[in-house]
Image: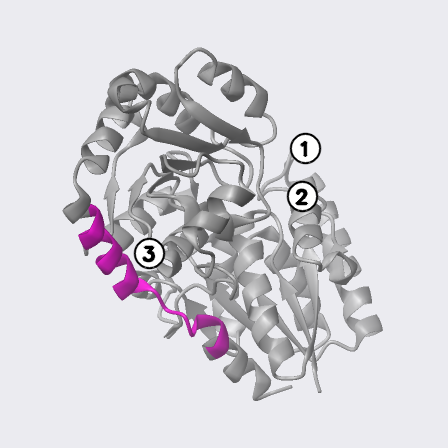
């Protein structure tokens, strides 16, 4: 069968949906390898998924790059060359780009080698790489229908954002035990994304005062990011809450399985996982996201009632804690949010993409 390369590194939002497509492609008998960044988060995620040997790190800088356009060009050419060498060595028959700089470099190599490529854009607002590369793609898949209007007239296929098969399958009792949580206290999970979220971390700590009355019945699982975990851990000391603080977690199926409510950024991958696991959410979009795409994601996801959305600038005091307390006190509303999340789940997203790609491999 054919050889597929998936360019999906840089953030968990690019990488984890790529891993989900890989599962579907291998189920059809194809071989898969990955182009990722040199970031530690990519290596850790691949290692946690048992995929480290299939990952090919290529050089990456942000658009424009530190050092100006000349430095960016040198880095980009280096990344294209590295990707091209690997494509020839692995006899790649098709490429799937999941967005970001890594996709741009890998697609550049595919174009030079006349290898067909596909794109997937998870966000409601397409990123620069997707906008620039869409016209040459065999097919552009999108997670939100709202994305298509930003593609400059290119017709897209609304596939949804792929999630890994294991998500949504862990029972609460098992999840609580695996994460070292109290078996009879309800869980609020705070997710800062694959690299953490300083503003979200601080808003949660400020909000603890508004949750004081719930401290005997509530516990907090906080994924703070490796760089912030120790500071956040200290922030919970003396608060009266049972809190488990982690920098990163390889077992998100346990996190979603344990959580009664999730507080999270609004990356498209996170939203797809929330829908797959049917967890009520309070979304705090990252305010500096390119094109404010996280706000667009959050609004697209929440418009049917699956989540609340609040801007980080409105969380200067204990407001986040107040929102959590209100939602935890309304079981009927949480159940309604679960139903609305289920309606947005697209469990066949990876299979839809795999079916189309398999047609040319």
Q: Please give the range of residues in magenta.
A: 334-351
The answer to which quarter of the image holds residue 67 is top right
Q: Residue at x 38, y 60 (%)?
A: 276
Give the CA distance from mark 3 to mark 1. 44 Å
The answer to which quarter of the image holds residue 91 is bottom right
Q: Residue at x 48, y 53 (%)?
A: 128
| Residue 198 makes an appearance in the image | no
Disc 2: which residue: 72
Does dot 3 land on a helix, a strand or a loop? loop
Between disc 2 and disc 3, the foreground one is 3
* Outermost residue toward the top in this view: 238
Q: Nearer the viewer, residue 236 or 180?
A: 180
Instruction: Let me know if residue 86 is in the magenta part.
Output: no
Disc 1: which residue: 67
Instruction: Let me know if residue 346 is in the magenta part.
Output: yes
Q: Which of disc 3 and disc 2 is earlier in sequence? A: 2
126 lies left or right of 247: left
Q: Which of disc 1 and disc 2 is earlier in sequence? A: 1
- Image x and y of residue 229, in percent: 56, 25
Q: Nearer the viewer, residue 311 or 253?
A: 253
Does dot 2 land on a helix, a strand or a loop? helix
Disc 3: which residue: 278
Which secondary structure type mostly characterizes the magenta part of the structure?
A: helix
Give the CA distance from mark 2 to mark 3. 41 Å
Give the CA distance from mark 2 to mark 1. 7 Å
- Image x and y of residue 272, in percent: 40, 57
Q: Residue at x 51, y 83 (%)?
A: 356
Contact between marks 2 and 3 (CB within 8 A): the answer is no
- Image x and y of residue 245, in percent: 52, 29
């Amino acid at each position: 069968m054919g050889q597929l390369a998936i360019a999906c590194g840089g953030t968990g939002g690019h990488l984890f949906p790529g891993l989900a497509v890989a599962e579907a492609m291998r189920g059809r008998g194809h071989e898969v390898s990955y182009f990722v960044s040199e970031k530690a988060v990519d290596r850790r995620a691949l290692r946690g998924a048992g995929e480290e040997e299939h990952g090919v790190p290529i050089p990456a800088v942000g658009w424009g790059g530190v050092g100006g356009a000349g430095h960016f060009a040198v880095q980009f050419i280096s990344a294209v060359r590295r990707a091209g060498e690997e494509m020839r060595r692995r006899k790649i028959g098709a490429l799937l780009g999941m967005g970001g700089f890594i996709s741009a470099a890998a697609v550049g190599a595919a174009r030079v080698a006349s290898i067909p490529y596909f794109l997937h854009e998870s966000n409601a607002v397409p990123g620069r790489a997707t906008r620039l590369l869409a016209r040459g793609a065999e097919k552009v898949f999108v997670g939100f229908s709202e994305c298509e209007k930003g593609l400059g007239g290119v017709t897209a296929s609304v596939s949804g954002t792929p999630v890994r098969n294991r998500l949504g399958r862990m029972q609460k009792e098992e999840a609580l035990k695996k994460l070292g949580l109290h078996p009879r206290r309800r869980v609020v999970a705070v997710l800062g994304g694959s690299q953490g979220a300083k503003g979200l971390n601080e808003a949660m700590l400020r909000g603890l005062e508004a949750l004081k009355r719930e401290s005997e019945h509530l516990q907090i699982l906080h994924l703070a990011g490796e760089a912030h975990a120790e500071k956040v851990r200290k922030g919970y000391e003396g608060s009266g809450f049972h809190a488990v603080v982690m920098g990163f977690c390889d077992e998100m199926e346990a996190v979603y399985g344990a959580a009664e409510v999730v507080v999270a950024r609004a990356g498209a991958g996170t939203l797809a996982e929330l829908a797959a696991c049917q967890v009520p959410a309070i979304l705090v979009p990252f305010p500096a996201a390119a094109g404010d795409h996280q706000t667009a994601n959050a609004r697209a996801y929440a418009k049917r009632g699956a989540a609340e959305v609040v801007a980080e600038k409105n969380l200067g005091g204990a407001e986040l804690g107040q929102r959590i307390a209100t939602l935890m006190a309304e079981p009927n509303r949480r159940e309604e949010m679960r139903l609305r999340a289920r309606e947005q789940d697209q469990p066949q997203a990876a299979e839809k993409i795999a079916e189309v790609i398999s047609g040319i491999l």
